[in-house]
Amino acid sequence: MDIDSTTENKSASFSTESVFTKKIFTCAESDTYNQNISGDHNLTDSGLEKIGWYSPKYSMSRPVKLDPDVLHENRCIVFEENNNTIDSYKVLRTKVISRMQETGSKLLMVTSALPGEGKSTTAINLALIMAKEFQQTVLLVDCDLQQQSIHKYLGFESDKGLVSYLLDDCPMTDLFTWPGIEKINLISGGRVIRDSSELLGSPRMVDLVADMKSRYPNRYVIFDMQSVLAGADALVMAPLVDNILMVVQEGNGPCLGNWSSMA
């Protein structure tokens, strides 16, 4: 398994250091694709044609509208025009996609050594910047079952999440949220649970990941996962994914022991 690490400076700038990681997965939603007769031409919102642009209509997802001020406050910045940090995320995107394309993988787990190091904002910004690529879509899944914070960072309410499917038999189609941004869909919200590692290792979760991985060949799935030293969740989830991105706050690099070899 490969493990990539990235270092976040939480004051403003974002720098990356590469050391990459392991396996991957895809999604479980019925999408219809927004393509014209020629099959590979699409129009942007401004009416400009983008040849090769692959953009689905998320007809089965709950639409929400994001507030730019909330996004900025929570450091979800990849759609801001004059933010130098965006280039750092583009570098990270290039490194991640290059490594995943080498192995044909589609599933990426984003975690950190300790809580508070920026893993969730990194997962969100990476998912958003990857959705700007022409030939793939992105599904962002909140797998931190003890927190469920992605929808809070993005500033919308959500009463259903992964736990709703795994424990309450909620249909998967009820979990998807479309944030009004082309080519990205997400799952986040609902109740949190303490026995999260047992749930992530359950047969229902294993089957869900397998289904997500096989459903859409052009979709990357990004899982925001509990920090490694906060519990067992990352260790349980690691065998199910293709690659792992480790986020470490700048100047804060705790020893992870043999975790990398176990992942």
Image: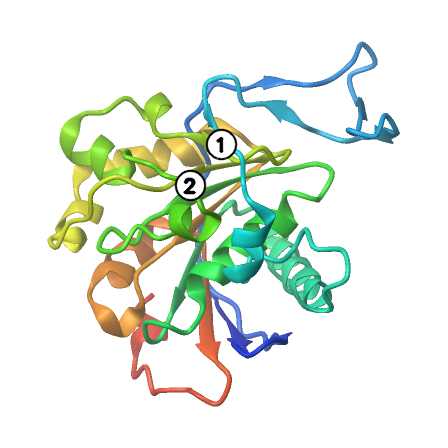
Q: Earlier in the sequence, mark 1 or mark 2?
A: 1
User: Residue at the location (24% across, 57% down)?
Assistant: 236
Choose between 99 and 155: the one closer to the eye.
155
User: Residue at the location (28% across, 39% down)?
Assistant: 162
Residue 86 versus residue 213 in the image, above or below: below
- In-image side of 15 versus 3 (left or right): right
Place of residue 19 in the rendered image (x, y in percent of width and height, measured from the top left): 54, 74
Q: Bin the neighbour count of mark 1 within 10 Å (Cα to Cα): few under 14, some 14-19, many 20 and up.
A: some
Place of residue 32 in the rendered image (x, y in percent of width and height, measured from the top left): 58, 16
Q: Disc 1, disc 2: CB below 8 Å?
A: yes
- In-image side of 101 versus 65 (left or right): right
Q: Bin the neighbour count of mark 2 within 10 Å (Cα to Cα): few under 14, some 14-19, many 20 and up.
A: some
User: Residue at the location (17% across, 52% down)?
Assistant: 196
| Local secondary structure at mark 2 | loop
Q: Name the residue under label 1.
A: 64
Place of residue 217 in the rendered image (x, y in percent of width and height, measured from the top left): 56, 32
| Local secondary structure at mark 1 | loop
Q: Which label belongs to residue 139? A: none
The residue type indicated by label 1 comes to: Val
Residue 262 versus residue 37 in the image, above or below: below
User: Most extreme residue toward the bottom, as rendered?
Assistant: 251
- In-image side of 97 versus 253 (left or right): right
Choose between 153 and 216: the one closer to the eye.
153
Specify the quadrant that holds the C terminus.
Answer: bottom left
**Would you say residue 8 is visible in this rendering?**
yes
Q: Quadrant of residue 81?
A: bottom right
Q: Mark 2 points at which residue?
A: 156
Residue 175 versus residue 85 in the image, above or below: above
Specify the quadrant that holds the N terminus.
Answer: bottom left
User: Residue at the location (12% across, 55% down)?
Assistant: 194
Q: In which quarter of the image is residue 42?
A: top right
Place of residue 96 in the rendered image (x, y in percent of width and height, measured from the top left): 60, 59
